[in-house]
Image (tube, grey):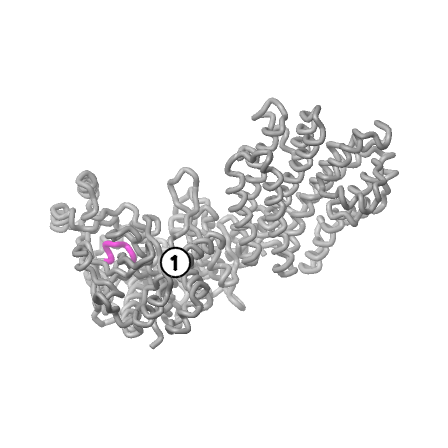
């Protein structure tokens, strides 16, 4: 496979994952704003920060409010990570790698772009927001379904999945990074209503509020939530799960190509480090440090993958 | 109505009669509910858009992708008509290959004075870098799109020989696919020669021209300028259908005397490159030094037998519009036979008499740039305003050698389905021809382009034309 094609697949799925995550962040922020009357400015600001577009946002707006944040994250063309920009960029990548995609996957990505371009042509009214977010989610799911249902399990699939999990790990880590202080047991006492709302937002940001409840029967503690998001391999958005998936896709490539590359070792080492920690030790060593280090290592791994498989010249 | 009478309609023979090739189709059509057909027509558009069968339009603010409008009434050609056409095309394409080989080697046709020396040697499309070199299999034009127009029951003319990188074949294939999906029962009633083997035939034709350096199964790749090119859909479509890689210039470089592509496992050699970029961008070391689209050094590797480039660089000399005017002589020179297909009468504005005639009769003529394509930079005299005629006359006087003029042809019409009924529109035809050392392969039919505006003679998709599925009947 061409290095360019591998890179195109990888980025296409990173971008699709990013768009979906952004929609989820908007949803969590919107819900937070609905359920709390005061201080939504801070909440919307953290939504922007978590999405990693703080600098761009600040150059356009001087305050954080629902209307502006939602518009910037969903449809602003000046924001390269807005849902609209990302759907276009993902589709451009899909055109680039068209020969590597099944018709079903290509059509799902193309339709995702057509539907979102239409949906996000004008600012989304707050009353229409839930429906709009649902549409974004559905089309994302269609692409994923087409990928799983129709693609050969070869290097094409591996690079697609690598993009998804590298992006997802980064996204979950950034959510924890921005909200880590609400998870620190020492800062507040367990079970305050403030914490509950904050924690629920964190869980909603990764669509895990219901699965958490189901697994923990309402035992909502900071440590349980942190454990769930970082180490629980049952959660498809936890850091541990994402990294184990990255390892297994890289292993598959290694088998297929009959070669072991630096990224294989890097990923295995990161995975091993995740497996050797428990949440107690992570808190002891410092949650914030742990997450910062993770983001750095995940990033370095991403760059190594790009180099090892010759995505670029 | 009177205005339309002067044109030959390929379907409608009289108030209640259709021409022979359309009898079967017409019977089916008469049974259809117009509302149903209108719905089908909209479905086709949705299908094209969802599949991304689009082309990019240059020079518009938001680089938009457009659909080429598809008309659901097929253009039908009888088997016997096709037999004659394809014989004529094969003859012409054979002569074109012999001509290109000759002008880059012994130049006998120039020495014999059949084609003026200066017209070749001073032509922008002539590449001195190709002198004294024979490409693998002596094939220059692996893929040709011969544009044909019809003016009467037996009157076919060749309008252009597209010997560089003819486009549109993906529409030929997708149009048939669309018709098969929309009206499957129609194909069980009317027997039509299939077109779907084109990608395999193309792959085979390219493999048959593998370079000397190739060992084992030839590795083919399609070279595209990238996703912003107007024909990008077609490039990816053909790569996909052939099951080969779609590469851009920056995926390729010279490695160990071969052109190699950057794969996830390192550089791997390419044997045959079906390039969809123009000569001038192919190699910044040999041609345009600013080109980012090509591969530095590819011409050297090509001449050393390390890669086959299809179509061959310099093949464009054969579809220069001034050279075109000599095509009947060229055909006779190399095949020893009279040309089966007629040329359109052509005035070479480089010649003083022809220039004078052209200027005096501009309002009746079609004037084209000798290197133009896609309908850009041409004048359709009868449709031009007084101002446009004056402006064009000035251009002509400034650079006469840059233009040729032709009479406005009475292009045949085929009905389109519009506003729930049939209405005649002008059409042309581009059959696709594959050339390999093993012979010439012509896909039955080709791409029919149709001017959707009533009375218009310009069928180019960049100028508002549409397409039709083209049938050659199996009789």
Query: Is residue B323 located in the magenta-colored stretch of the structure?
Result: yes
| Image-quadrant location for residue B206 | bottom left
Left or right of A254 on screen, residue A97: left
Magenta stretch in the rendered image:
B319-324
Magenta segment main secondary structure:
helix
Residue at figure coordinates x 78%, y 42% from the top left: A229
Q: Position of residue B131 (x, y in %)?
A: 34, 57
Residue at figure coordinates x 14%, y 45% from the top left: B359
**Quadrant for the C terminus of chain B in the image:** bottom left
Q: Position of residue B266 (x, y in %)?
A: 60, 54
Q: Nearer the viewer, residue B117 or B383?
A: B383
Q: Position of residue B284 (x, y in %)?
A: 43, 46
Q: Position of residue A45 (x, y in %)?
A: 67, 28
Query: Is residue B126 located in the magenta-colored stretch of the structure?
Result: no
Residue at figure coordinates x 57%, y 41% from the top left: A86
**Quadrant for the N terminus of chain B in the image:** bottom left
Q: Nearer the viewer, residue B24 or B306?
A: B24
Q: Secondary structure at mark 1?
A: helix
The residue positioned farthest toward the bottom in the image shown: B475
Residue at figure coordinates x 60%, y 50% from the top left: A9
Circle 1 sits on which residue?
A: B35
Could you tell me which chain the residue with mark 1 belongs to? B
């Amino acid at each position: 496979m061409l290095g360019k094609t591998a890179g195109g697949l990888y980025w296409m799925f990173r971008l699709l994952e990013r768009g979906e995550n952004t929609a989820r962040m908007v949803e969590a922020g919107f819900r937070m704003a609905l359920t709390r009357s005061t201080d939504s400015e801070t909440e919307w600001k953290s939504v922007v920060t978590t999405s990693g577009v703080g600098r761009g946002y600040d150059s356009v707006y001087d305050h954080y409010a629902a209307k502006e944040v939602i518009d910037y994250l969903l449809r602003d063309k000046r924001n390269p990570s807005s849902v609209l920009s990302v759907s276009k960029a993902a589709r451009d990548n899909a055109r680039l790698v068209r020969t590597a995609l099944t018709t079903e996957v290509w059509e799902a990505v193309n339709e995702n772009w057509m539907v979102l371009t239409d949906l996000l042509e004008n600012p989304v009214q707050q009353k229409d927001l839930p429906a709009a977010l649902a549409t974004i989610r559905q089309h994302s799911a269609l692409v994923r379904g087409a990928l799983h249902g129709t693609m050969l399990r070869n290097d094409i699939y591996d690079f697609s999945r690598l993009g998804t999990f590298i992006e997802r790990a980064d996204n979950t880590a950034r959510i924890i990074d921005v909200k880590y202080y609400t998870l620190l047991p020492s800062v507040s006492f367990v079970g305050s209503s403030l914490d509950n709302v904050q924690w629920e937002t964190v869980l909603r940001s990764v669509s895990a509020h219901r699965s958490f409840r189901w697994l923990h029967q309402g035992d909502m503690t900071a440590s349980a939530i942190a454990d769930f998001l970082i180490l629980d391999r049952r959660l498809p958005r936890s850091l541990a799960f994402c990294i184990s998936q990255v390892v297994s896709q890289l292993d598959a490539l290694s088998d297929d190509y009959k070669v072991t590359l630096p990224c294989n070792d890097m990923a295995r080492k990161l995975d091993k480090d995740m497996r050797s920690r428990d949440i107690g030790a992570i808190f002891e060593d410092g949650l914030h440090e742990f997450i910062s280090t993770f983001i750095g290592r995940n990033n370095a791994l991403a760059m190594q993958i790009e180099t090892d498989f010759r995505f670029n010249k | 109505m009177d205005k339309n009478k002067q044109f030959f309609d390929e379907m409608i023979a009289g108030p209640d009669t259709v021409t022979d090739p359309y009898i079967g189709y017409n019977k089916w059509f008469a049974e259809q509910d117009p509302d149903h057909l209108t719905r089908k027509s909209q479905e086709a558009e949705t299908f094209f858009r969802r599949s991304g069968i689009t082309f990019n339009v240059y020079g518009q603010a938001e680089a938009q992708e457009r659909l080429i409008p598809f008309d659901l009434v097929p253009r039908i050609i009888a088997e016997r008509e096709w037999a004659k056409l394809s014989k004529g095309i094969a003859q012409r394409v054979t002569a074109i290959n012999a001509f290109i080989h000759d002008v880059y080697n012994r130049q006998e046709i120039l020495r014999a004075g059949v084609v003026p020396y200066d017209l070749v040697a001073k032509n922008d499309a002539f590449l001195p870098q190709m002198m004294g070199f024979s490409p693998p299999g002596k094939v220059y034009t692996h893929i040709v799109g011969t544009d044909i127009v019809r003016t009467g029951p037996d009157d076919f003319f060749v309008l252009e020989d597209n010997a560089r990188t003819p486009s549109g074949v993906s529409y030929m294939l997708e149009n048939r696919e669309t018709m098969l999906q929309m009206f499957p029962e129609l194909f069980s009633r009317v027997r039509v020669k299939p077109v779907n083997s084109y990608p395999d035939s193309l792959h085979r034709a390219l493999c048959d021209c593998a370079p000397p350096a190739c060992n084992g199964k030839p590795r083919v790749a399609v070279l595209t300028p990238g996703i912003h090119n107007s024909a990008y859909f077609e490039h990816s479509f053909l790569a996909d259908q052939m099951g080969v890689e779609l590469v851009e210039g920056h995926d390729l470089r010279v490695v160990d005397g071969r052109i190699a592509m950057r794969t996830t496992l390192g550089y791997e050699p390419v044997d045959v490159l079906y390039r969809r970029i123009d000569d001038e961008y192919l190699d910044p070391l040999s041609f345009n030094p600013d080109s980012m689209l090509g591969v530095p050094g590819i011409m050297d590797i090509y001449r050393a037998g390390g890669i086959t480039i299809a179509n061959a660089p310099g093949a464009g000399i054969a579809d220069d519009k001034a050279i075109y005017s000599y095509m009947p002589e060229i055909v006779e020179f190399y095949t020893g036979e009279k040309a089966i297909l007629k040329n359109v009468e052509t005035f070479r504005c480089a010649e003083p008499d022809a220039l004078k005639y052209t200027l005096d009769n501009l309002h009746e003529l079609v004037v084209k740039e000798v290197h133009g394509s896609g309908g850009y930079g041409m004048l359709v005299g009868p449709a031009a305003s007084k101002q446009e005629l004056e402006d064009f006359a000035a251009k002509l006087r400034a650079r006469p050698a840059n233009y040729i003029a032709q009479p406005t042809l009475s292009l045949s019409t085929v009905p389109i389905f519009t506003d729930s009924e049939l209405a005649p529109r002008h059409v042309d035809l581009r059959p696709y021809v594959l050339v390999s050392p093993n012979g010439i392969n012509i896909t039955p039919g080709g791409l029919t382009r149709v001017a959707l505006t009533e009375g218009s003679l310009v069928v180019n998709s960049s100028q508002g034309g549409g397409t039709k599925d083209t049938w050659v009947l199996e009789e």
